[in-house]
Amino acid sequence: MTQIYSGETVTVRCEIQGGEGAQWTYEWRRGQSSIHSASTEHTFSSATESDGGEYRCWGTGSFWTEWSDVITLTVLPPPKPTMTLQPPWTQIYSGETVTVRCEIQGGEGAQWTYEWRPAKLHTPPTSREYTINSATESDGGGYSCWGRRSSSRTEWSELITMTILSTEISVSTETRSMVRGRRDTDREKHRSKKKRKEALPGQSGVISSH
Protein backbone atom coordinates (compact mmCIF):
# COMPACT_ATOMS: atom_id res chain seq x y z
CA MET A 1 0.00 0.00 0.00
CA THR A 2 1.26 3.46 -0.91
CA GLN A 3 0.27 6.47 1.20
CA ILE A 4 0.61 10.08 0.13
CA TYR A 5 -0.90 13.38 1.29
CA SER A 6 -3.40 15.38 -0.72
CA GLY A 7 -1.70 17.96 -2.90
CA GLU A 8 1.27 15.72 -3.63
CA THR A 9 2.14 14.27 -7.03
CA VAL A 10 2.42 10.53 -7.58
CA THR A 11 3.07 8.41 -10.66
CA VAL A 12 1.94 4.79 -11.12
CA ARG A 13 3.93 2.88 -13.70
CA CYS A 14 3.18 -0.32 -15.63
CA GLU A 15 6.33 -2.33 -16.34
CA ILE A 16 6.35 -5.49 -18.44
CA GLN A 17 9.34 -7.64 -17.56
CA GLY A 18 11.00 -9.04 -20.67
CA GLY A 19 8.96 -6.78 -22.93
CA GLU A 20 11.59 -4.07 -23.35
CA GLY A 21 11.88 -2.73 -26.88
CA ALA A 22 8.43 -3.94 -27.92
CA GLN A 23 5.56 -1.60 -28.77
CA TRP A 24 2.95 -1.92 -26.08
CA THR A 25 -0.43 -0.37 -25.53
CA TYR A 26 -1.54 -0.22 -21.94
CA GLU A 27 -4.87 -0.32 -20.20
CA TRP A 28 -5.43 0.89 -16.65
CA ARG A 29 -8.17 0.26 -14.15
CA ARG A 30 -9.05 1.71 -10.78
CA GLY A 31 -11.30 -0.84 -9.17
CA GLN A 32 -13.64 -1.82 -12.01
CA SER A 33 -13.40 1.51 -13.84
CA SER A 34 -11.13 2.05 -16.84
CA ILE A 35 -8.68 4.96 -16.90
CA HIS A 36 -8.24 6.69 -20.24
CA SER A 37 -4.49 6.32 -20.55
CA ALA A 38 -2.56 4.14 -22.99
CA SER A 39 0.82 5.20 -21.62
CA THR A 40 3.21 3.12 -19.55
CA GLU A 41 2.62 5.47 -16.62
CA HIS A 42 -0.15 7.56 -15.16
CA THR A 43 0.54 10.70 -13.09
CA PHE A 44 -1.74 12.30 -10.51
CA SER A 45 -0.82 15.95 -10.12
CA SER A 46 -1.96 17.49 -6.84
CA ALA A 47 -3.69 14.28 -5.76
CA THR A 48 -6.97 14.38 -3.88
CA GLU A 49 -8.56 11.82 -1.59
CA SER A 50 -10.83 10.72 -4.45
CA ASP A 51 -7.74 9.52 -6.35
CA GLY A 52 -7.21 6.79 -3.79
CA GLY A 53 -8.07 3.22 -4.70
CA GLU A 54 -6.77 -0.03 -6.18
CA TYR A 55 -4.90 0.23 -9.48
CA ARG A 56 -3.78 -2.40 -11.98
CA CYS A 57 -2.69 -2.55 -15.60
CA TRP A 58 -2.05 -4.85 -18.54
CA GLY A 59 -0.46 -4.47 -21.96
CA THR A 60 -1.17 -5.54 -25.53
CA GLY A 61 1.40 -5.87 -28.29
CA SER A 62 2.33 -8.99 -30.14
CA PHE A 63 0.39 -10.71 -27.36
CA TRP A 64 -1.72 -9.81 -24.35
CA THR A 65 -0.32 -9.86 -20.86
CA GLU A 66 -2.17 -10.81 -17.73
CA TRP A 67 -3.45 -8.17 -15.37
CA SER A 68 -0.80 -6.92 -12.99
CA ASP A 69 -1.06 -7.28 -9.26
CA VAL A 70 -3.13 -4.60 -7.55
CA ILE A 71 -1.40 -1.61 -5.99
CA THR A 72 -3.39 0.33 -3.39
CA LEU A 73 -3.02 4.09 -3.29
CA THR A 74 -4.24 5.97 -0.21
CA VAL A 75 -4.47 9.77 -0.28
CA LEU A 76 -4.59 11.25 3.21
CA PRO A 77 -5.49 14.78 4.27
CA PRO A 78 -2.40 16.69 5.43
CA PRO A 79 -1.84 16.25 9.15
CA LYS A 80 -2.11 19.24 11.46
CA PRO A 81 0.99 20.04 13.49
CA THR A 82 0.97 20.70 17.22
CA MET A 83 3.15 23.20 19.05
CA THR A 84 4.62 22.03 22.35
CA LEU A 85 6.94 23.55 24.95
CA GLN A 86 9.60 21.81 26.99
CA PRO A 87 9.33 22.29 29.91
CA PRO A 88 5.55 22.31 29.33
CA TRP A 89 4.82 25.71 30.89
CA THR A 90 3.46 28.71 29.02
CA GLN A 91 4.85 30.97 31.75
CA ILE A 92 8.57 30.89 32.50
CA TYR A 93 10.96 33.25 34.23
CA SER A 94 13.56 35.34 32.45
CA GLY A 95 16.90 33.58 32.25
CA GLU A 96 15.35 30.12 31.92
CA THR A 97 15.71 27.85 28.88
CA VAL A 98 12.71 26.63 26.87
CA THR A 99 12.41 24.51 23.72
CA VAL A 100 9.63 25.15 21.18
CA ARG A 101 8.76 22.00 19.22
CA CYS A 102 6.63 21.39 16.10
CA GLU A 103 5.11 17.90 16.12
CA ILE A 104 3.27 16.48 13.10
CA GLN A 105 1.00 13.66 14.21
CA GLY A 106 0.82 10.87 11.65
CA GLY A 107 3.76 12.33 9.75
CA GLU A 108 6.43 10.25 11.44
CA GLY A 109 9.09 8.94 9.10
CA ALA A 110 8.45 11.59 6.45
CA GLN A 111 11.00 14.23 5.54
CA TRP A 112 9.41 17.54 6.51
CA THR A 113 10.62 21.08 6.23
CA TYR A 114 9.26 23.57 8.74
CA GLU A 115 8.29 27.20 8.87
CA TRP A 116 7.77 29.12 12.10
CA ARG A 117 5.97 32.18 13.37
CA PRO A 118 7.41 34.51 14.43
CA ALA A 119 10.02 34.47 11.67
CA LYS A 120 12.73 35.43 14.20
CA LEU A 121 13.07 31.71 14.92
CA HIS A 122 15.98 31.14 12.57
CA THR A 123 16.08 27.35 12.49
CA PRO A 124 17.37 24.98 9.81
CA PRO A 125 14.39 24.09 7.58
CA THR A 126 14.58 20.42 8.58
CA SER A 127 14.65 21.14 12.32
CA ARG A 128 11.38 20.60 14.18
CA GLU A 129 12.46 22.39 17.34
CA TYR A 130 14.06 25.61 18.51
CA THR A 131 15.69 26.26 21.88
CA ILE A 132 15.59 29.67 23.53
CA ASN A 133 18.51 29.98 25.91
CA SER A 134 18.28 32.52 28.75
CA ALA A 135 14.82 33.77 27.74
CA THR A 136 14.04 37.48 27.94
CA GLU A 137 10.71 39.32 27.95
CA SER A 138 11.12 39.96 24.20
CA ASP A 139 10.88 36.18 23.62
CA GLY A 140 7.30 36.16 24.87
CA GLY A 141 4.39 36.03 22.43
CA GLY A 142 2.55 33.65 20.12
CA TYR A 143 4.27 30.78 18.32
CA SER A 144 2.99 28.51 15.54
CA CYS A 145 4.42 26.32 12.77
CA TRP A 146 3.60 24.33 9.66
CA GLY A 147 5.35 21.62 7.67
CA ARG A 148 5.93 20.90 4.00
CA ARG A 149 6.69 17.61 2.28
CA SER A 150 7.15 17.44 -1.48
CA SER A 151 4.29 19.49 -2.95
CA SER A 152 2.06 19.06 0.11
CA ARG A 153 1.90 21.28 3.18
CA THR A 154 0.05 21.15 6.47
CA GLU A 155 -2.15 23.79 8.04
CA TRP A 156 -0.72 26.19 10.58
CA SER A 157 -0.69 24.76 14.07
CA GLU A 158 -2.77 26.30 16.82
CA LEU A 159 -1.10 29.35 18.35
CA ILE A 160 0.67 28.79 21.65
CA THR A 161 1.37 31.89 23.74
CA MET A 162 4.41 32.07 25.96
CA THR A 163 4.87 34.65 28.73
CA ILE A 164 8.28 35.52 30.16
CA LEU A 165 8.02 36.73 33.77
CA SER A 166 10.58 39.07 35.30
CA THR A 167 12.31 37.82 38.45
CA GLU A 168 13.44 41.33 39.48
CA ILE A 169 10.10 43.05 40.11
CA SER A 170 9.00 41.11 43.20
CA VAL A 171 12.47 41.12 44.78
CA SER A 172 12.91 44.85 44.23
CA THR A 173 9.46 45.64 45.67
CA GLU A 174 10.04 43.45 48.71
CA THR A 175 13.44 45.07 49.34
CA ARG A 176 12.03 48.59 49.14
CA SER A 177 9.20 47.62 51.47
CA MET A 178 11.60 46.15 54.03
CA VAL A 179 13.88 49.20 53.90
CA ARG A 180 10.92 51.58 54.21
CA GLY A 181 9.58 49.60 57.17
CA ARG A 182 12.97 49.62 58.90
CA ARG A 183 13.28 53.39 58.40
CA ASP A 184 9.79 53.94 59.82
CA THR A 185 10.67 51.83 62.88
CA ASP A 186 13.93 53.70 63.46
CA ARG A 187 12.11 57.02 63.15
CA GLU A 188 9.52 55.97 65.76
CA LYS A 189 12.26 54.84 68.16
CA HIS A 190 14.02 58.20 67.77
CA ARG A 191 10.80 60.11 68.49
CA SER A 192 10.09 57.96 71.55
CA LYS A 193 13.52 58.63 73.05
CA LYS A 194 13.15 62.36 72.44
CA LYS A 195 9.75 62.43 74.21
CA ARG A 196 11.09 60.56 77.24
CA LYS A 197 14.02 62.94 77.51
CA GLU A 198 11.75 66.01 77.38
CA ALA A 199 9.44 64.54 80.03
CA LEU A 200 12.17 64.28 82.77
CA PRO A 201 12.00 67.19 85.37
CA GLY A 202 15.00 69.45 85.78
CA GLN A 203 17.27 68.83 88.84
CA SER A 204 19.06 71.45 91.07
CA GLY A 205 21.73 71.14 93.79
CA VAL A 206 20.65 71.24 97.53
CA ILE A 207 22.95 72.34 100.47
CA SER A 208 22.10 71.00 103.85
CA SER A 209 23.63 71.46 107.27
CA HIS A 210 23.48 69.40 110.32
Image (spheres, rainbow, N blue to C red):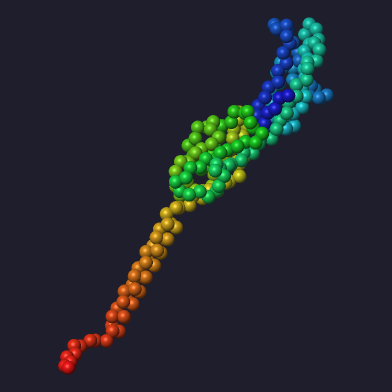
Q: Picture coordinates of residue 113 (x, y %)?
A: 56, 32
168 or 124, which lies in front? 168
Q: Picture coordinates of residue 84 (x, y %)?
A: 58, 42
- One can see residue 35 in this view: no
Q: Is residue 156 positioned above or below 206 on the image?
A: above
Residue 33 location, quadrant: top right
**Viewed as shown, does residue 132 lie left or right of 4?**
left
Q: Where's the N terminus, which quadrant?
A: top right
Total number of numbered discs in the rendering: 0
- The structure residue drawn at horizontal position 70% and vertical position 6%, both measured from the top left corner, is 21
**Viewed as shown, does residue 136 lie left or right of 34?**
left
**Viewed as shown, does residue 205 lie left or right of 33?**
left
Q: Picture coordinates of residue 136 (x, y %)?
A: 44, 47
- The structure residue drawn at horizontal position 79% and vertical position 21%, both measured from the top left corner, is 29
**Viewed as shown, does residue 99 lie left or right of 67?**
left
60 or 52, which lies in front? 52
- The structure residue drawn at horizontal position 24% and vertical position 86%, both measured from the top left corner, is 202
Q: Where's the C terminus, which quadrant?
A: bottom left
- What residue occupies the far front of the structure in this picture? 210
Q: Picture coordinates of residue 170 (x, y %)?
A: 44, 58
- One can see residue 73 in this view: yes
Residue 179 location, quadrant: bottom left
- What residue occupies the far right of the structure in this picture? 32
- The structure residue drawn at horizontal position 70% and vertical position 20%, both measured from the top left corner, is 12
Residue 9 location, quadrant: top right
Q: Is residue 80 positioned above or below 42 on the image?
A: below
- What residue occupies the far bottom of the structure in this picture? 210
